[in-house]
Image (tube, helix red, strand yellow):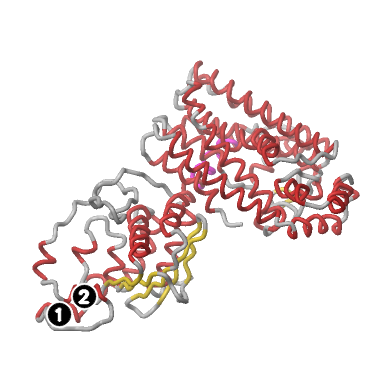
Amino acid sequence: MEIDSAARLFVATVDEIATRAPAISAAAARELHGIRLGLHFGDGTRAGLRSENSFLFASPENIETPDVEVFFDDRSLNLLYDLEHTPVSEVWERSLDVRGERPQVLAAWRTFRLLSQRASGLRAVQILWRDYRDRTHSTWSAPPADAMTFAANPLTPRDTGWSALDFLDHVQPDEIEAMPRLAAPTIVERARMLWDGHRSSAWTDATPISDSDLDATLTACKRAVADEMQRLIPDREPKAELYDLMRSYPMREGKGLRPMLTIATCGALGGRSIDAVRTAAAIELFHNGFLVHDDISDGSTHRRSKPTLHEAFGVGLAVNTGDGMNLLAIDAILSNLSKLGLARTLGLIHEIMHMCRETVEGQAIELGWIRDCIVPPHDEDYFVMSTKKTGWYTCISPCRLGAVCAGETSPELLDRFNEAFRLIGIAFQIQDDVLNLVGDESLYGKEQAGDLLEGKRTVMLIHAMREADPKLRARLTEILRLPRGEKSTSDTAEILTAMQRLGSIDYAIKLADDLAHQGVHRFEEDLRFLPENESKGALRQIANYVTTRRL
């Protein structure tokens, strides 16, 4: 989208924040709390802003019947991202005004304050605003011409229809100049209420918080870990039958959550990021080895938009490749001995063994359900299986392993990561299950409705079986008993239709959102002991990524 107006600048900014800093987007959405904003800009363009759950939606269009209307010219818009001055000390006439009910106006004010103080530190946002300012330099560098006329005759009566502008018409320029200015803070600040109707607080009284760019951090961590995996995979024979195949799945880039959690946790506890890279690479090798074997067990045909290893090269070579990747992962963990020392390496081995045990136990539970044609009756059954099968090695263990890389092996300290990332891991898996049914295959990377063919016991299936009448439940059970090779597309379509009719997909989306919010709350409470630094900011972005993931 070309940034040719203030409205498009605003929309592009919100989109960048949602992509790069989910924690900021989610916090702003909570402040806005469903209020619909109509935004008017000095160049005549308009935009809309609203929130839904933890999502912020901005569009370069006017919102009909907004709860709050805000007018900015380019100069007042600039103040949103100025951490040095308070807007009231800098605003000119015809520059800023707001219409709406008091509680909603205050909520809009808190939303913009949060966005300005936390998003202005993101490089991508700075680039957007810098480029826009470069194209409209004269507007940003001086007050509007009519403001200069006003300065010569400040008491000229005026009826703009905007109450705040009428008030500013009667403020003497020397009064504005005398208003106190704040020193630029060294770090961005946590958004907080200035006035909640009962008490007020100063602009500067805020708890320090540090945010990081999720997209940039994921990219950097993925690159470092990919390079390390290339070093770990031997350049020797047999290449075509083993080592080249080991490179196949890791090179089909995923999201990179595990490497980032490992490296960021190490940094948050004062460790060096480089000390966690090899362990992060080992986790990725384990992960990809698990995927190779899972795809065989499930009969999957595609992984990350390409044929699975067993489909392309046969089951025998695929099984052997998965075994080899697990062996390399163990070797990578042991090779930390010379770099991290005996104590930390023993801690890593202990955590890795626990992670692998949880994973195979979770896989066994689900495969047993499928073999025996059991659909557990309660969501909690799914929570246990999901946490074991994917939650530990996707969310919990990477954090614990990163902490060990930083030298922390206390069970009490390591356990503080468990509950927050257990909840986040379950929410993430439910969302993946939903995407398998209704997501874009080119984005999701697996065949559409593959979970239905494989008979995966998802929250949607559990809910559908729970809500179905006896006749429908019997029919769904009949389909579930069929092996994957005997299920037809009409069979899976029948299950999907039942889920949609019973509200099972909507139920799962709402459940994932609730769990993700609980996880974010536990993150802030349980990990309060971590100092506010860039690495903790990266962990916070991952925690909030689940709440802002669009399905």
Task: Tell me the tag on residue 137.
Answer: none
Marks 1 and 2: CB-CB under 8 Å? yes
**Residue 138 visible to the viewer:** no
SS category of the residue bearing label 1: helix
The residue lying furthest to the front in this view is 198
Depth check, front residue: 195 or 191: 195
- Residue 70 at x, y percent in the picture: 35, 71
- Residue 75 at x, y percent in the picture: 26, 70
Q: CA distance from mark 1 to mark 2?
A: 8 Å
Q: Quadrant of residue 268?
A: top left
**Residue 525 visible to the viewer:** yes
Residue occupying the point 40% across, 67% down: 10
The amino acid marked with disc number 1 is Phe
Task: Tell me the tag on residue 93.
Answer: 2
Residue 423 colored in magenta in the image: no
Q: Is residue 139 left or right of residue 507?
A: left
The vertical placement of 394 against 164, above or below, is above
The vertical placement of 164 against 243, above or below, is below
Task: Identify the residue under disc 1.
Answer: 150
The amino acid marked with disc number 2 is Glu
The vertical placement of 123 against 161, above or below, is above
Q: Is residue 134 left or right of residue 464?
A: left
Residue 223 colored in magenta in the image: yes
Residue occupying the point 64% across, 35% down: 387
Q: Is residue 38 left or right of residue 148?
A: right
Depth check, front residue: 297 or 130: 297
